[in-house]
Amino acid sequence: MSFQYFSKNCEILPIEEAVISLDRIEYTYGFGVYEAVRVSNGVVYFLDHHMERLLGSATSIGLEHPFSEEMVKKAILELVEKTEEQTYNLKVLLIGASKKEDALLAILCLNPFFPDKKMYRDGVELTTTNYERLYPHAKTLNMLQSYLSYRDARAKGCYDSALINRRGCITEGTRTNFFTINGGTIYTPCEEEILLGVTRKAVLHVARQNEFEVEEKDIRPEDLKNYDGVFLTSTSSKIVPIRKVGEIECPPAPEELKRLMKLFEEFLEKGNGVL
């Protein structure tokens, strides 16, 4: 699908004008933050939480700008209203400048990358990368190592790459959050060390509402075989089981994980995009 419009500094413009000057040093140096927002059947999902994280990411790296949360939300909803397509992703870019008033807010409609249905049934494979992001809670444009790791994973036929910290623990994927499960207990890496994904937050909300326990825990690749199951979450993929991380084989998706996947699908279908 193709899109005709985008939003620049809260103004709807033709997509042909979606350009950035090559001499904009803040962009070329990655001084910016972004969000990927799911739109399904015209409904914008978890908008408040995405806006909270976008502006929080900007604060984390000292990116000053003139845009309020309400301004960004209004710009997003105006673009969605202008867009004829019903299901797509929005990419919200907030790029810094030497002066606060010159910061750039750009909102684009993009085709999402949806996993093949068999991946939900059979699980996916991940490579591994030894890497720790500088600002774990900030979703920044400084994505070189993540990009290289993801590119390598895709070249090897894998879905993503699991990031390993200096203590040998899995923190997250290059664009996904990582979990394990035993019975009715879900284990997540320490929240201080990861990007707090909005889909992650929604999944854990649904889990707690349905009597799952959630615990933070160091998760090492060599221990994955000791769990009932392993899975990832993201905006486009929702919940996907993992069958292999590096050379480590993971167990097939257990019934409790399948139940969580079903509960989350029902939550998305019945909800109005609000968490």
Image (tube, helix red, strand yellow):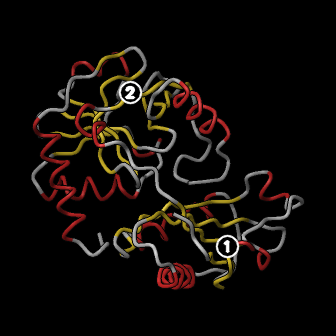
Q: Name the residue under label 1.
A: 15
Q: How far apart are marks 2 and 1 (CA)?
A: 36 Å
Residue located 49% across and 27% down the image? 164
Q: Nearer the viewer, residue 80 or 211?
A: 80
- Where disc 1 sits, the SS reads helix
**Which image quadrant: the C terminus?**
bottom left
Neighbours of disc 1 within 10 Å: few (<14), some (14-19), many (20+): some
Q: Can residue 105 be seen in this view?
A: yes
Horizontally, is 231 left or right of 50 in the view?
left
Horizontally, is 131 left or right of 77 in the view?
right
Residue located 51% across and 63% down the image? 1
Residue located 19% across and 32% down the image? 253
Q: Residue 194: x, y in percent?
A: 46, 44
Amino acid type at circle 2 is Glu
Place residue 205 in its image quadrant: bottom left
- Residue at the far right in the pictured view: 23
Q: Which mark is residue 125?
A: 2
Q: How many labels does the image show?
A: 2
Neighbours of disc 2 within 10 Å: few (<14), some (14-19), many (20+): many
Amino acid type at circle 1 is Ile
Q: Nearer the viewer, residue 210 or 23?
A: 23
Place residue 129 in its image quadrant: top right
Horizontally, is 36 left or right of 49 in the view?
right
Q: In this view, does 111 lie above or below 47?
A: above
Place residue 169 in its image quadrant: top left
Q: Residue 115: x, y in percent?
A: 37, 44
Residue located 29% across and 43% down the image? 117
- Where disc 2 sits, the SS reads strand
Q: Residue 228: x, y in percent?
A: 17, 27
In primary-sequence order, the first of circles 2 and 1 is 1
